[in-house]
Image (cartoon, rainbow, N blue to C red):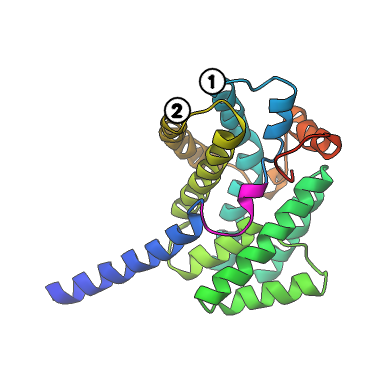
Amino acid sequence: MWTCRMNINVKRFENFLDVVQVCDSTFPIGTFNHSFGMENYLRTDKITNADDFEIWLDTYLKTQFKYGEGLLINLCFKALEEEKIEVIWEYDKIITCSSQAAETRNGTKMIAKQMIDLVQTLHDIPLLDDYKQQIKKATVYGNPAIVFAIFAHYKGLDADEAILLYGYSINSTMIQNAVRAVPLGQKSGQLILQRTIPLLEEIVAEMKQLDASYLGANVPGIELSQINHETQVFRLFMS
C-alpha cells in the first residue's frame, strides 16, 4: 500500500514538473520578445528604476492579468470540467477582440501557436490538436492561456495551481525582460519576483467571485501604452 501511494504521488509530481517546464522563462515560445506595453513606459520615463517597474508589474497583474489570462484560465477549467468545449472557443474570441492594441493581439496569437507546437512535440493532447485546427481554419484566434489551461487540466492540476503557475511564468519573463531594458539588477528582479507571489494568491482568491462578463476588462493606461508602442521609433521588443 505504501508503495502504491508513493507511485501515485510520484506520477503527480512528474505531471506537475511537465507543467513547470512550460512555465520556465526559457521555454522557447517567444515571450522574451514582448513587453506588453512595459517598454513604452520605459521610453516615456515612467519606468526608470526597480521601484517604478514593480509598480507597473503590480498594476499589470491586478488588471490585465486578473481580468485577462488569469480569469481566462479559471473559466476554461470550468468549461473543461463541464465538457463545454465550444464555450472555450467563445472565450478565445472575447479575449482577443477585447484587446485594442494590434501588436498585443498579434503577439498573443504568435505565442499561442508556438506554445501548441512545442507542447505537442513533448506531449500528445487531442484537444490541443483540435485547437490548432480551429486556429488554422480561422474560427478562433489563439491564446496561450487557453493552451496552458488545456495542458494543465490534462496533466491533472487544479485551476488555482494553473493560475498561480501561469502568473509566476508571466512575472518571471517580464522581470527578465526588464533586466534587459530597465536599470534593474538580477538581485532586485528576484526580490520583486518573490514579492509578487502573495499578490498572485490574492488575485486567485478574488477571481473566484468573477464570471465571464469580466473577461477582457482593462485599464486605459496599460492599453494605451501597448497601442503607443506600435509607433515607437526605437524598440527592443515586438510589443
Q: Residue 69, position in %: x, y?
A: 63, 49
Q: Residue 95, position in %: x, y?
A: 74, 51
- Of labels 1 and 2, the one closer to you: 2
44 left or right of 147 in image:
right
Residue picked out by circle 2: 188
**What range is drawn magenta here?**
26-33
- Res. 1 image quadrant: bottom left
178 left or right of 228 in image:
left
Please, what is the dominant secondary structure of the magenta stretch?
loop
At horizontal 45% and vertical 28% (from top left) the residue drawn is 188
Give the residue type that dot 1 points to: Asp
Front-lying residue, 103 or 74: 103
At horizontal 60% and vertical 28% (from top left) the residue drawn is 182
Q: Is residue 14 visible?
A: yes
Q: Residue 208, position in %: x, y?
A: 53, 44
Give the residue type that dot 2 points to: Ser
* Secondary structure found at label 2: helix
At horizontal 77% and vertical 32% (from top left) the residue drawn is 225
Front-lying residue, 96 or 57: 57
Q: Is residue 29 magenta?
A: yes
Residue 51, numbered label: 1
Q: Is residue 83 visible?
A: no
Q: Quadrant of the C terminus?
A: top right
